[in-house]
């Protein structure tokens, strides 16, 4: 494997979103990712493919109701 996996900080920088939003996008399965123990990593090739295909939005849009 020649590509290094991206960290959440790198992902948030690329997507221009907050660190918390990057975690949420991964946690909800919107962004393709892998878990290494408690850490989340993103393969740059899969991220580029996801972006090239138009990505995907959070269910319910950006005004989701908070969990009860």
Image (cartoon, rainbow, N blue to C red):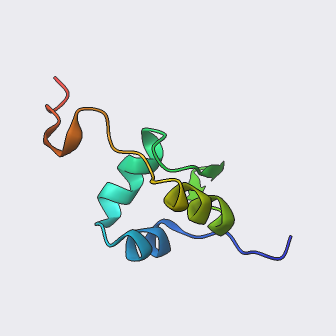
Q: Quadrant of residue 28?
A: top left
Q: Quadrant of residue 64?
A: top left
Residue 38 at what x, y percent from top left?
57, 50
In which quadrant will I find the N terminus? Answer: bottom right
The answer to whether 13 is drawn above or below residue 19 in the figure is below
In which quadrant will I find the C terminus? Answer: top left
- Report the residue at 43% width, 75% height from top: 14
The answer to whether 18 is drawn above or below residue 39 in the figure is below
Residue 60 at what x, y percent from top left?
23, 32
- Report the residue at 40% width, 54% height from top: 23
The answer to whether 5 is drawn above or below residue 68 in the figure is below
The answer to whether 11 is drawn above or below residue 33 in the figure is below
- Report the residue at 30% width, 67% height from top: 17
Q: How many marks?
A: 0
Q: Is residue 16 shown left or right of residue 26?
A: left
Q: Is residue 17 shown left or right of residue 43?
A: left
Residue 46 at what x, y percent from top left?
64, 58
Residue sitting at the far right: 1
Q: Nearer the viewer, residue 10 or 49?
A: 49
Residue 4 at what x, y percent from top left?
71, 74
Q: Nearer the viewer, residue 35 or 3?
A: 3
- Report the residue at 41% width, 45% height from top: 56
Residue sitting at the far front: 53
């Amino acid at each position: 494997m020649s590509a290094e996996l991206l960290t959440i900080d790198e992902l948030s920088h690329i997507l221009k979103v907050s660190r918390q939003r990057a975690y949420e996008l991964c946690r909800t399965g919107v962004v393709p990712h892998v878990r290494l123990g408690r850490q989340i990593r993103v393969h740059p090739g899969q991220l580029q493919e996801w972006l090239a295909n138009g990505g995907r939005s959070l269910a319910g849009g950006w005004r989701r109701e908070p969990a009860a």
